[in-house]
Amino acid sequence: MSMTAIVLAAGEGTRMKSRHPKVAHKLLDKPLVWWPVNAAREAGADRIVVVVGHGADEVRAIFANDPDVECVEQTERLGTGHAMMCVRDALGAFQGPTVVLYGDTPLMRAETIRSLVNETKANHNACTVLTMSPADPTGYGRIKRDANGGVVAIIEHKDCTPEEQATLTECNSGIYCFCGRRLTENIDKIGNDNAQGEYYLTDMVGIYHEMGEPVSALLAADDSELLGVNSRVQLAQVTKIMQRRINEQLMASGVTMLDPDQVWVGPEVSVGQDSELLPQTMLWGKTSIGEDCVIGPNTRLTNVTVADGASVEETVGYDTVIESGVTVGPRAYLRPGTHLLKNAHVGTHVEIKNSTIGEGSKVPHLSYIGDTQMGSGVNIGAGSITCNYDGVFKHRTTIGNDVFVGSDTMMVAPVAIGDGALVGASSCITEDVPAGALAVERSEQVMIEGYATKRMSRLKEEKARGERAER
Ligand code: UD1
Ligand code: MG
C-alpha cells in the first residue's frame, strides 16, 4: 500500500543516562529506531522519514545504507507538532496515508499499522488515533469523546482538570494515521498555548473535530506493542518481549529450543525446520541456519550462513559460509571470509580467517588457518599454523587435495603444498612442496643409550650426600 511513515526520534532520553541518543540503544542486535522503521516498511510504507535531533549524526548513521529512509533534522525540540512541521518544511506536502510512529516504541507490529491505515481509508478520516487503556494512565494524553462516543480531542495529562485526569482513562498511544493532504494544509493551526509551551501534534484531533473532519480512535489489540523505552530497565523488558515473540515464532515453525530464555535471535535471521538452538546462542545480522542443524551451546554467529545438517558448537563466527554436514567446535573462531565446504570439520581451539576449507577436509585441533585456499580430503595436524603475516603484508597459502600436514607445522606464506603431499610433523615450511612429495624440516634425532638412567642416579647420590642443598 502506498503510504508515508514518519518516525519521531529527536528526543534525548535523559533517563537512559547515556552519552548516546536513546533510539541508538540496541534491542537484540538492532537500534531501537530500526524497529518501527522496519515495521513501517513491512506494512508497506514506500517513504520513511525519521525525525532526528538529539545525537542526530549517530541516528543518521544507522540508516546511512538504507535507501528507503530519509532523515530530517529538528534542530529545536518544540514538541511533536513542531517535529511534524519540520518534516513538512523539508519534504513538501505529503499525500496519502501518513503514519506517525515513535523511535522509542519498538514493539509496534506491521499488522497494527496496516489496520490503522485501513481504518483511516475506510472512513476517509483526517486522523485515526491508536489508543490504549493502561492500568496507570498518568502522563499520557487523554481521549475526550462526546455523548455519542465520537472523538472530540486529546488533552495532555498536564492540561487536564483533576476530574478529567480521573475519568478519562483511554489514552493516546502517540501512534496515528493522518491523511497527508489534510495534515499538510492544517498543521500550522497548532499553537503552543498549553501547560508545556509545546506544539502538540495531539491538537490536530481537536482542530479536525471543530472543522467537521472525520476523526476516530482504534483501541490497540495488544497494549504491549505500545511500550516505550525511557530507561534501561524498560529496554530490558522490551528486549524480553521481543525475544519471546521471535523465539515463539521460530518454535511454531519447527525449531527446537532447550531453553528459549537463553536464545537470542535477531529479526533478520532465519532458522530451518528441525534445527535445534541450544542455550547461550545468539544469532545476529543476516544469519541463516538450514534444516536439521544443531547450534550452540555458547555460540554467537553474525552474518553466517549454515546449510542443512551442520553442527556448530561453542563457536564465534562472522561473515562465514558453512556448507551442509560441516561440524564446527567446540570452541572455534570463524572470522570474515571463512568458507567451510561440505562435510569439512573445524575442531577445538581453531581459528580460521579468509580461507576456504575444502570438502571433507579437517582442521581438528589448535590451529590457525588464514588467507588459505585448501583442497578436499586434507588433514591438518594439531597445532599447525599458516604464518600469513610478515609484519606489513598478508600472504596466501595454497594447499592441494589430499594433503597430510603433520602436527605443529608452520607454513610460512606465500607457500603452496601440492596435491597428495606429506609434510612431516614439526616442520617449518618456507618453500613450495611439489605434489606427491614428502617435506620434512627438522634436525635429526640424537640417541645416547643409557644416558638418562646414569644422570638420574648421579643426581640422587648427590642429594643423599647433602652435596647440594635443595632450593
Ligand atoms: C506524547 C503525546 C501523548 C501520548 C504519549 C504517548 C504529544 C503532545 N503527546 O506525549 O498524548 O500519550 O506521547 O507516549 O504528542 N519528539 C520529537 N520532537 C519533539 C518532541 C518529541 O521528535 O520536539 C519525539 C520524542 O523523541 C518521542 C516522541 O516524539 O519519541 C514523543 O515525545 P514525548 O516527549 O515522549 O511525548 P509525551 O510527552 O510522552
Ligand atoms: Mg513520552
Image (tube, rainbow, N blue to C red):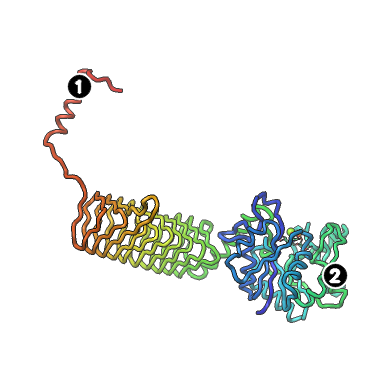
Count the numbered circles shown. Answer: 2
Residue tagged 2: 189
Residue tagged 1: 462
Q: Residue at x 38, y 57 (%)?
A: 352
Camera-nearest residue between 236 and 86? 86
Quadrant housing the C terminus: top left
Quadrant holding ligand 2?
bottom right
Asked if residue 171 shows in the view, the reply is: no
Camera-nearest residue between 441 and 317? 441
- The secondary element bearing badge 1 is classed as helix
Q: Amino acid at mark 1?
A: Glu
Place of residue 265 in the rendered image (x, y in percent of width and height, measured from the top left): 52, 62
Q: Is residue 123 above or below residue 108?
A: below
Q: Which mark is residue 99?
A: none
Q: Is residue 144 above or below residue 429?
A: below
Place of residue 75 in the rendered image (x, y in percent of width and height, measured from the top left): 74, 60
Place of residue 354 in the rendered image (x, y in percent of width and height, measured from the top left): 39, 60
- Left or right of 314 on screen, residue 449: left
- The quadrant holding residue 140 is bottom right
- Left or right of 439 on screen, residue 40: right
